[in-house]
């Protein structure tokens, strides 16, 4: 069972820089009298270790009763890697969200990659030298390492990834950039995209902007105010790519072929699987006027025209249509066009 060592309990392990046989010869040599005196009334017990958070170990062994005036010495073995410290090169997708597990691609020589899991005491080291212990797992099928920040408070900053190989400290090449997940409170559809978002128009590319989209993993669209509507996944494209640095916009393709005019929302998800709504409007088809262009005679202050269109044409009220050198206001379907004198 695991226990914490204290007074009267000894821990003995093979020293990392000595093989066991030379060490045994050393104990039988000049230090033998000292060793015998020191270990008198000592009972040796085998044990094994389990790693703890940071650089600690849990020692597991028998805790039975000892004879009077006898103390226990627990002995365990430590496996020493028969290779140099790994040379880790962190690849491009090195922006990771705080409070999440993230796989970071790395480049490591094949011989060192095989034993990379033996690295201990992983940490993120800031520019001022402050070290934050983190859990790192080797993902053998992806040639990546997983950095776990779920239970570790790490501020948004740039860090170096460090560890211990045996008792040797080493540092990976490249940086790890920790950034917070976006809340998308200021995200919105660009005005030019909103004008293109027409009902029954087919596949339309639009652009969302106003936030950092680099950690986006899924985008869905759902009708607002319809309790029976289910979100439907839509394709999206990041300017740089997933976790390749801050990205202030994101392209989304939405198929409006079966969408009716009205309010909808994009549901943007990140690694935390939470959906963040971004409201948009799917616009009705614009009115179609078939008797254009309209000719306006100069020299007349008021002229009457009839605008012709389909029977089901929606009546639109135009605020203004710019003509040079004057502005024309179209008010109704049977409109009176009033030429406005240009102010000087």
Image (cartoon, rainbow, N blue to C red):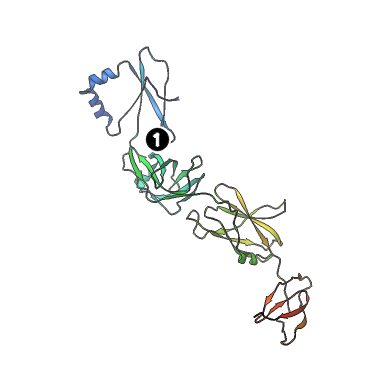
Residue lying at the far top of the rendered structure: 68
* Mark 1 surroundings: few (<14), some (14-19) or many (≥20) residues within 10 A: few
* Front-lying residue, 43 or 214: 214
In the rendered image, which quarter contains the N terminus?
A: top left
Where in the figure is residue 290, as x and y percent of width and height? 73, 78
Residue 92, compared with residue 27, is above or below; it is below
Say what secondary structure mark 1 lies in: loop
Q: Which residue is mark 1?
A: 55
Left/right of residue 330 with respect to residue 266 in the rendered view: right
* Front-lying residue, 283 or 295: 295
Residue lying at the far front of the rendered structure: 344
* Front-lying residue, 215 or 331: 331
Residue at left offset 50%, top offset 39%: 151
Residue at left offset 42%, top offset 15%: 65
In the rendered image, which quarter contains the C terminus?
A: bottom right
Splitting the image into 4 quarters, where does residue 169 fall? top left
* Front-lying residue, 192 or 115: 192
């Amino acid at each position: 069972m695991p226990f914490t060592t204290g007074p009267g309990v000894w821990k003995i392990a093979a020293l990392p820089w000595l093989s066991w046989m030379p060490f045994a010869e050393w104990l039988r040599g000049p230090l033998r009298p000292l060793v015998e005196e020191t270990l008198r009334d000592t009972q040796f017990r085998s044990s094994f270790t389990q790693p703890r958070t940071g650089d600690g170990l849990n020692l597991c062994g028998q805790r039975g009763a000892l004879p009077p005036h006898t103390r226990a010495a627990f002995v365990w073995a430590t496996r020493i890697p028969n290779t140099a410290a790994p040379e880790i090169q962190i690849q491009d997708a090195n922006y990771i969200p705080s409070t999440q597990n993230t796989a970071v691609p790395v480049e490591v020589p094949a011989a060192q990659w095989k034993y990379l899991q033996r690295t201990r005491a992983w940490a993120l080291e800031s520019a001022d030298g402050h070290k934050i212990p983190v859990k790192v797992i080797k993902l053998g099928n992806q040639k990546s390492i997983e950095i776990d920040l779920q239970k570790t408070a790490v501020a948004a900053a740039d860090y170096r990834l460090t560890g211990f190989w045996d008792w040797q400290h080493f540092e990976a090449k490249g940086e790890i950039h920790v950034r917070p997940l976006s809340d998308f409170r200021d995200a919105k559809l660009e005005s030019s995209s909103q004008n293109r978002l027409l009902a029954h128009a087919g596949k339309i590319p639009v652009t969302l902007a106003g936030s950092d989209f680099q950690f986006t993993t899924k985008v869905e669209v759902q009708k607002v105010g319809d309790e029976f509507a289910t979100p439907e996944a839509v394709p999206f494209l990041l300017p740089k790519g997933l976790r390749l640095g801050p990205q202030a916009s994101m392209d989304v393709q939405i198929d409006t072929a079966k969408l009716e005019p009205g309010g909808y929302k994009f549901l943007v998800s990140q690694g935390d699987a939470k959906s963040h709504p971004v409201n948009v409007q799917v616009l009705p088809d614009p009115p179609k006027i078939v008797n254009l262009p309209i000719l306006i005679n100069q020299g007349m202050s008021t002229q009457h025209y009839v605008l012709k269109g389909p029977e089901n044409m929606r009546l639109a009220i135009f605020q203004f249509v710019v003509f040079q050198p004057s502005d024309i206001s179209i008010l109704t379907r049977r409109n009176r066009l009033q030429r406005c004198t240009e102010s000087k």
